[in-house]
């Protein structure tokens, strides 16, 4: 096995859109920082078997090849030493991306802009993949200048304190440590019905609930602070809907990290309210960490 073959893989799905090009450059930087190989994947069920006797002008795979080649050329200009391989897969995109995710350290996809009507739709392929991916899946918005990839800004981690998964905390702390970034951990919690009266919110109950939540959050984070002593952590408790809490005041954030339970109750949405708010309304890249 070669050294490159032994490396972890970061896979990016390409479809020729500006979003996917931004995703490819973000994935390239991620792969470079993690010492991984970058896989450029384009999947289409109609990709034809390669035949050397076909003239170029009759090549049925011309556009798939061009999509991948253009992304590869842009990446090589920025990351000349990064190992990259191109992959054209004759499968439906969802199936191909899920299969690739199972063999990758992370999967990166382009995500539509948050402005206007597009902000309410992730896209059929992205939604299916996100709901079923078994690896970390990162959604990246299009940039006006796709080459202006930056890792500046805080890492924000949206955290529920019910069955807090180690995978989510490990990814958030590990990413902040690698980027030398501040880790802002946000916990949102709805006030219980008794906290409300005719005059609004009962200040005593609100204070008690906030104090309890802050204590719970600090206790959960203590072992991770010890494990990552160089990471500056800012804890934030917001007594409001967790879905609103994770997307409030995140302009300029470098990365938003949220979790997704692999097993959800029957008849429930494929993704929860917090994850839905993050992927539809966060202006920054969103890393979705699957967990039990």
Image (tube, grey):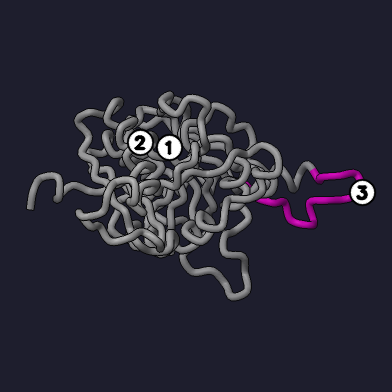
196 relative position to 49: left or right = right
Q: Is residue 222 magenta?
A: no
111 relative position to 31: left or right = right
Residue extending farthest left: 1
Q: Earlier in the sequence, mark 2 or mark 1?
A: 1
In the rendered image, residue 123, in percent from the top left (x then y), is placed at 57, 53
Q: Is residue 170 visible?
A: no
Question: Disc 2 on helix, strand or loop?
Answer: helix
Question: Disc 1 on helix, strand or loop?
Answer: helix
Residue extending farthest right: 198
The nearer-to-camera label among 3 and 2 is 2
The nearer-to-camera label among 1 and 3 is 1
Q: CA distance from mark 2 to mark 1?
A: 9 Å
| Residue at numbered disc 1 | 21
Task: Identify the disc placed on residue 35.
Answer: none
Q: Label 1 crowding class (10 Å Cα cut-off): few <14, some 14-19, many 20+?
A: many
Q: Are marks 2 and 1 in contact (CB under 8 Å)?
A: yes
Q: Quadrant of the C terminus?
A: bottom left
| Residue at numbered disc 2 | 70
In the rendered image, residue 165, in percent from the top left (x then y), is placed at 43, 56
Q: Label 2 crowding class (10 Å Cα cut-off): few <14, some 14-19, many 20+?
A: few
At 62% from the left edge and 32% from the top edge, which residue is drawn?
249
In the rendered image, residue 243, in percent from the top left (x then y), is placed at 64, 48
Q: Label 3 crowding class (10 Å Cα cut-off): few <14, some 14-19, many 20+?
A: few
Magenta extent: 188-202
At 30% from the left edge and 32% from the top edge, which residue is drawn?
73
| Residue at numbered disc 3 | 198
């Amino acid at each position: 096995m070669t050294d490159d073959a032994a490396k972890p893989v970061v896979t990016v799905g390409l479809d020729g859109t500006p979003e996917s090009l931004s995703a490819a450059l973000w994935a390239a930087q991620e792969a470079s920082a993690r010492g991984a190989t970058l896989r450029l994947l384009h999947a289409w069920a109609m990709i034809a078997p390669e035949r050397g006797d076909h003239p170029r002008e009759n090549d049925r795979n011309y556009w798939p090849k061009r999509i991948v080649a253009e992304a590869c050329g842009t990446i090589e200009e920025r990351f000349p030493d990064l190992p990259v391989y191109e992959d054209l897969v004759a499968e439906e995109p969802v199936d191909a991306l899920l299969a690739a995710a199972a063999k990758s350290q992370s999967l990166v996809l382009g995500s539509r802009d948050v402005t206007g009507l597009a902000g309410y739709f992730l896209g059929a392929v992205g939604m299916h993949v996100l709901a079923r991916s078994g690896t970390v899946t990162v959604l990246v918005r299009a940039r006006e200048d796709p080459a202006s990839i930056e890792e500046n800004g805080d890492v924000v981690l949206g955290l529920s304190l019910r069955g807090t998964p180690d995978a989510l905390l490990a990814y958030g702390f590990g990413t902040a440590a690698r980027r030398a970034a501040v880790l802002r951990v946000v916990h949102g919690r709805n006030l219980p019905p008794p906290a409300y009266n005719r005059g609004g919110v009962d200040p005593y109950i609100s204070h008690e609930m906030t104090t309890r939540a802050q204590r719970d959050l600090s206790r959960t984070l203590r072992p991770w602070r010890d494990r990552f002593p160089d990471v500056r952590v800012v804890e934030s408790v917001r007594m409001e809907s967790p879905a609103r809490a994770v997307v409030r005041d995140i302009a300029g954030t470098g990365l938003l990290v949220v979790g997704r339970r692999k097993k959800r109750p029957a008849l429930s949405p494929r993704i929860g309210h917090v994850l839905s708010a993050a992927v539809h309304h966060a202006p920054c890249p969103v890393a979705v960490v699957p967990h039990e």
